[in-house]
Image (tube, rainbow, N blue to C red):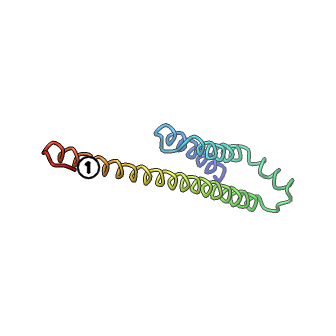
Amino acid sequence: MIVAAGIILALLIIVLVMWMLLTRRLREKYAVLWLMIGLTVLILGLFPQLLLGLTSVLGVQVPANLLFALAIVLLLGVALHLSWELSQAEEEIRRVAEEAAISRAEADRFEARLNELERRLDEASSGKAP
């Protein structure tokens, strides 16, 4: 029963990731990680003796402990990667905000200069001396 649940979970992960890719709800660079996870869960579900062999090679007493340790390492890796992505996005947002502020200041200067020129033109056309 547990093996069937693992296989079903793996297939759900793979189908969900593919659907999210096709509907553009998940970018390819993130999908690769989740597809690897889905395939790993599928392989371990189809061949549970691989997990048993891996636990004996690594000296882990209980296969579930190895799964939990791998899950923790995976989650830490995902958290670190997402923190890096967030830092990159924040830096890009800061840069774009600075560029927008500079552009806004230049537009304000041009508008003030244009208003000044229009005022002078109006004065000149009405016969007033500047």
Q: Position of residue 3 (x, y in %)?
A: 66, 50
Answer left or right for 106 relative to 68: left
x 36%, y 51%: residue: 109
Q: Is residue 73 above or below residue 50?
A: below
Q: Is residue 71 above or below residue 113?
A: below
Answer left or right for 119 relative to 61: left
Q: Position of residue 61 (x, y in %)?
A: 82, 62
- Which residue was labeled with disc 1? 115
Neighbours of disc 1 within 10 Å: few (<14), some (14-19), many (20+):
few
Q: Residue furthest top?
A: 22
Q: Position of residue 33 (x, y in %)?
A: 64, 46
As shown in the figure, which amino acid type bears the numbered disc 1? Asn
Q: Nearer the viewer, residue 69 or 47?
A: 69
Q: Secondary structure at mark 1?
A: helix
Q: Nearer the viewer, residue 35 or 129?
A: 129
Q: Nearer the viewer, residue 41 or 30?
A: 30
Q: Residue furthest front?
A: 129
Answer left or right for 130 relative to 72: left
Q: Position of residue 25 (x, y in %)?
A: 48, 44
x 81%, y 55%: residue: 55
Quarter location, residue 101: bottom left
x 57%, y 56%: residue: 86
x 32%, y 49%: residue: 113
